[in-house]
Image (spheres, helix red, strand yellow):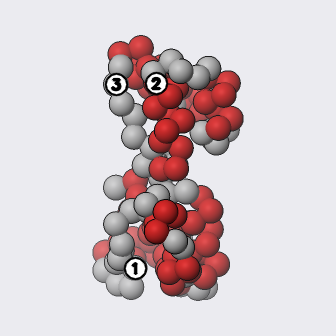
Amino acid sequence: MFETDVQLVMNEYLKNLIREKNFLKEARSWNNYTDYKPMCRVSRLQGINVIAANTPNRYVNLVSRKGLVGLDSLNKLARKWLPPLPIDTATGKYYDYFLKTMGGHKVPGIEIYQAQNLWDSSMA
């Protein structure tokens, strides 16, 4: 559930350097953090790493508005928070499954599909 750009905050929490309330705020935790809390607590107690793997939402949103070409405007520092590019978005089983998930309806703009694909590829 955590985005790649909060890995440092995650590491600080796991090493007991910051309190949970600071961790939750600065890591931009979701409303359903309670579902993830046991895993984070056990990891903290056992010294187990947790990888913040999700693409930052601001970049997923950028792609949903401008398509994958929107990522071209990001600088080198911002790109380090992205999964390896390029990602396949045009055709194939993933696209077919996405359409099926959308109720078989054609996606109004490829940008929505590309944004979902970016999000999913960072978690894969």
> What residue sits right under mark 1 in the picture?
89
Secondary-structure class at tag 3:
loop
Comparing 19 with 63, the one in front is 19
Near-viewer residue (12 or 56): 12
- The location of residue 47, given as percent across then percent down, is 35, 20
Q: Are marks 1 and 3 in contact (CB under 8 Å)?
A: no
Name the residue that disc number 3 marks. 48
Q: Going 40% across and 53% down the picture, which residue do you hit? A: 123
Question: Which amino acid type is marked by label 3?
Answer: Ile
Task: Look at the numbered discs 2 and 1 and tell me whether their residues touch, using CB distance below 8 Å.
Answer: no
Residue pictured at 31% horizontal, 75% vertical? 93
Disc 2 to disc 3: CB gap under 8 Å: yes
Mark whose residue sits in front, 1 or 3: 3
Q: In x, y percent, where is residue 23?
A: 61, 30
Real-space Cα separation, disc 2 to disc 3, in angstroms: 8 Å
- Tell me the kind of residue under disc 2: Leu
Q: Secondary structure at mark 1?
A: loop
Pointer 2 residue:
14
Residue at (34% x, 55% y) in the render: 124
Would you say 67 lies left or right of 84 here?
right
Question: Which comes sooner in the sequence, label 2 or label 1?
Answer: 2
